[in-house]
Amino acid sequence: MMLQIQDLHVSIGGNEILRGVNLDVDAGEVHAIMGPNGSGKSTLANVLAGRDGYEPTGAVTFQGEDLLVMSPEQRASAGVFLALQHPTEIPGVGNLYFLRTALNSLRRSRGLDELGVSEFLALAEERMKLVEMDRSFMSRSVNEGFSGGEKKRNETLQMAILEPTLAILDETDSGLDIDALRVVAGGINAQRRADRAMIVITHHQRLLDYIVPDRIHVMVGGRIVRSGDKSLALELEAHGYGDGAAEPVLAAKP
Amino acid sequence: MSVSADIKEFAGQEYRYGFSTEIDTDTVPKGLSEDVVRLISAKKGEPDWLTEWRLQAYRHWVTLEEPQWQNVQYGPIDYQDIVYYAAPKAKPKLASLDEVDPELRAMFDKLGISLAEQERLSGVAVDAIVDSVSVATTFKKRLAEVGVIFCSFSEAVKDHPDLVRRYLGTVVPYRDNFFATLNSAVFTDGSFCFIPKGVHCPMELSTYFRINTAGTGQFERTLIVAEEGADVSYLEGCTAPMRDENQLHAAVVELVALEGARIKYSTVQNWYPGDAEGRGGIYNFVTKRGKCAGANSKISWTQVETGSSVTWKYPGVILQGDNSVGEFYSVALTANRQQADTGTKMIHIGKNTSSTIVSKAISVGHGQNTYRGLVKTLRSAEGARNHTQCDSLLIGASSGAHTFPYIEVKHPSAKVEHEASTSKVSEDQLFYCRQRGISEEDAVAMIVNGFCREVFKELPMEFAVEAQRLLNVSLEGSVG
């Protein structure tokens, strides 16, 4: 098993957001996590990536290692990638420079040689085609002045260049019009591989028309309340999060 | 007893040591008096007019009080405890690099300075350093072919006295301010640069690494004159870290641009900043000013200030000629207990003069950074324009950023704009970088370098690289 989450509880400032999450993800699989706003989906993504400010308990094992004790950069080095819901702007830092620094940091941490400028450029040019980005993006500052769609494409490009083992996509479809969605989803689909897993977080079924998951999980009130195959998406579309939503919310009351 | 009372009392005294033959030929005793000023001038074999000019400055200086309005704090300076003239031989010599402070060597390694350079810097070949008025000698011949004069100030006084006399003190008069006046009385050397009419200086001129003898003050004087249509880019690197007590560095730089001339002056300043507790370090109290004397001239200052325990300087431009242009690009970083009160003065006198100010201040740890800028448009300055952008970046909860813009507009057609921002290196930015595999320290350096990019792109290429390295070194240990 690539990723094993067992009884994960997470609090922020004493407020419990995740209330016992269990999830197994194997190599080659794409898992979708759906659920209403505030159900804890993004918290799960951030905790897996090691963001500060959370107090997790429980066990998260990634390729046999305890993920929770690792720093964010160690997790990145181990192959965990998080596409952010709201990618951060870094004024004055060129997009291409940022990407090359990131890739070479990862390569260094894995004992590989750094890529030179021309090698990197060739790689970037090739991967940019995946998300239909042109060169003008590369000289701009990281995410600065990017439209919502451009930011999400940029996240997808970063994933294509950094080649993670586990990619967590946090609402990568939010704020995208239908054309942008098609481009981004196409970029993600092209990166599905037998040795790579993905966790796709969304609250729109429409994304799953483009990225067809192996498993779908419904998260409500900080727990996964239902799991199923891709047909679950259709059911949710027809009936909403329905009964499953009521119970954990009640159960969550003190 | 107050500092100024101290000075006045001492200043009123006769020079106690006199012209005794007991005096080492390479030094003068501590302290300042009219006799010391005469002695310095005599040692340098200066003409009478210059001796007299120094004495005028000295006599004015004793009437002045040290300014107190800056937003920096430092202990009192005992002006009688400073050696005002020291020749190189006073510096203790080291037999080899092995004797150099390992910490110092580690610093050089981080800076990427070559071993040969390290030897020069570490005092192994110190004679070359203290007098190092630059690479001038290397390229003197090539420069002379096009008529460019680039030499030490002392040489200029000997070889080109008329030029020195015509321009010395025309931009920064000896009465200008406490430290400039002190410098006028006791300056020992510096650089002189003259670009004749219509000449584009064929190479960038630079003055590197000056290290002074412990216990001395450093008072250099630089004068750059660009005649009609001339063009020059001048680099000044003060990248010599130094273990020492607080040392006073009170330099004066004067730039004169005649009609259509362009002067670009870049500084990367990394004097020893003191240790983490704020012990030691340089007091960098410098007066730098340019005069766009002729129409269509341009003077551009770019500075990267990462060193010194206290920095206090306002490189300015007097925009006298019509359509003249003044620019000021600044990065000032204060870490640990460093303090900086820096900015610029743009004085618009001519018609349609314009100025641009871009200031980037970074405060780390307990660092305190103040931007202080004056934009003044006189009644004559019809159509004057200024744009000021003043950004501060804070790292850590104890750092501080302060902004004091002064704007005086006397002509109704003038347009003056001021933009300011203060931001922090955000958790979001750090997390984003780290999630992509970049260490926290590298992430901070990257974010800070991005913040400074507008200024760095004004620097000549190799200086920009050095500036980035310096920033990264200064930021080390600032996170976590």
Image: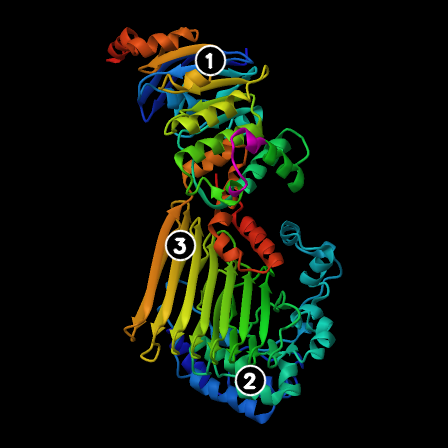
Choose top left, top right, bottom left or bottom right for residue B133.
bottom right
**Residue type at mark 3?**
Asp
In the picture of the structure, the residue carrying the numbered disc 3 is B391
Residue occupying image coordinates x 46% and y 50%: B451
Q: CA distance from mark 3 to mark 2?
A: 44 Å
Residue B19 appearing in the image: no
Q: Residues within 10 Å of mark 3 (few under 14, many from 20)?
A: many
In the picture of the structure, the residue carrying the numbered disc 2 is B36
Secondary element type, mark 1: loop
Q: Are marks 3 and 1 in contact (CB under 8 Å)?
A: no
What is the chain letter for disc 2? B
Q: Residues within 10 Å of mark 2 (few under 14, many from 20)?
A: many
Q: Is residue B78 left or right of residue B21?
A: left
What is the chain letter for disc 3? B
Q: Give the numbered dot on residue A213.
A: 1
**Residue type at mark 1?**
Pro
> Most extreme residue toward the bottom, as rendered?
B48
Residue B41 sits above or below residue B426 on the image: below
